[in-house]
Amino acid sequence: MNTYEISLQALADPTRRRIFELVRTRPRSVAELAAGLPVSRPAVSQHLGVLERAHLVRHRRRGTRHIYHPDPAGLAPLRAYVESLWDDVLTAFAASGGESGGPDDARDEE
Amino acid sequence: MNTYEISLQALADPTRRRIFELVRTRPRSVAELAAGLPVSRPAVSQHLGVLERAHLVRHRRRGTRHIYHPDPAGLAPLRAYVESLWDDVLTAFAASGGESGGPDDARDEE
DNA sequence: AGATTTCGTAAGTGTTCACTAACGGTTAGT
DNA sequence: ACTAACCGTTAGTGAACACTTACGAAATCT
């Protein structure tokens, strides 16, 4: 389903990444998040919508407040993707000799 | 230095991510990359510039051709960052009981 | 019931960004 | 030296996006 794309784009924005870092450990309300950020409350709300659509956060209602907490479902595919990239790069790096100049012969396989 | 920010934003673009996935295993030239993508050659060249500034790829010249290959230096901080996020989310998830509803008491620590 | 708190949504705006077209520069081949 | 191949850079354009202001909805309190 390639869900890591959405998570990747969601975490690419600095404000959104900061929000996720705040929610990461302890659940917080929207106003509480906006208080510690240089943007307005609606902006935070919109960012939370993006994060929720990426399955990075979820929310539950407590009275009039919406409490947001992290959701592992969105981060897991992203983690797996980055991990696979890392493995491939390390393998290619080791196979090429480990230096930057590279060997003198040129491969032409597809 | 927070270098993972640049790598994150670099890989957020679909075309750029596709380019990196192509270069990931085998070094390729600019024209070779552009041939397998729905964008022009200058576009690929610009994307490679962004990836190189993020230390995700490097290039060496072979005649008139510029051969691009992956660079572990950019991916390593990104991997470490995602990994730390993953650990924190898992810890918070386990500490909250593991379900979505959460407990009935509200923490107020900073 | 009315007032207050907390939040989501819609509309509008300014900026960022990915892309193409045109140009110039470097290297290899004849 | 002249031509061809391969590439980077610049200028300009259209779309995506983050942000603010204004408004409306849901829940709690007096």
Image (cartoon, coloured by chain):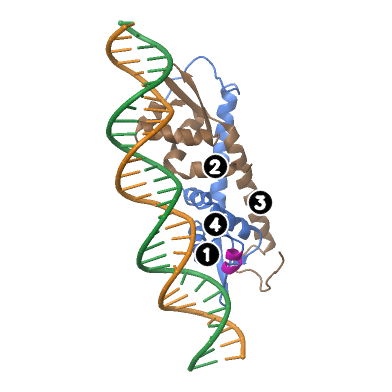
Chain colours: A blue, B brown, C green, D orange
**Tag 3–tag 4 contact (CB < 8 Å):** no
Q: Which residues make up the magenta segment?
A: A30-35
- Disc 3 is placed on an element classified as helix
The residue under label 3 is B87
Pointer 2: residues within 10 angstroms few (<14), some, or many (20+)? some
The residue under label 4 is A56
Instruction: Give the spatial CA distance, label 2 vs label 4.
Output: 20 Å
Residue type for callout 3: Asp
Place of residue B99 in the rendered image (x, y in percent of width and height, measured from the top left): 62, 65
The residue under label 2 is B6
- Nearest the viewer among D6 and A53 is D6
Residue type for callout 4: Leu
Foreground tag (2 vs 4): 2
Q: Pointer 3 indicates a residue of which chain?
A: B
Residue type for callout 1: Ser
Q: Is the same chain shared between marks 2 and 1?
A: no
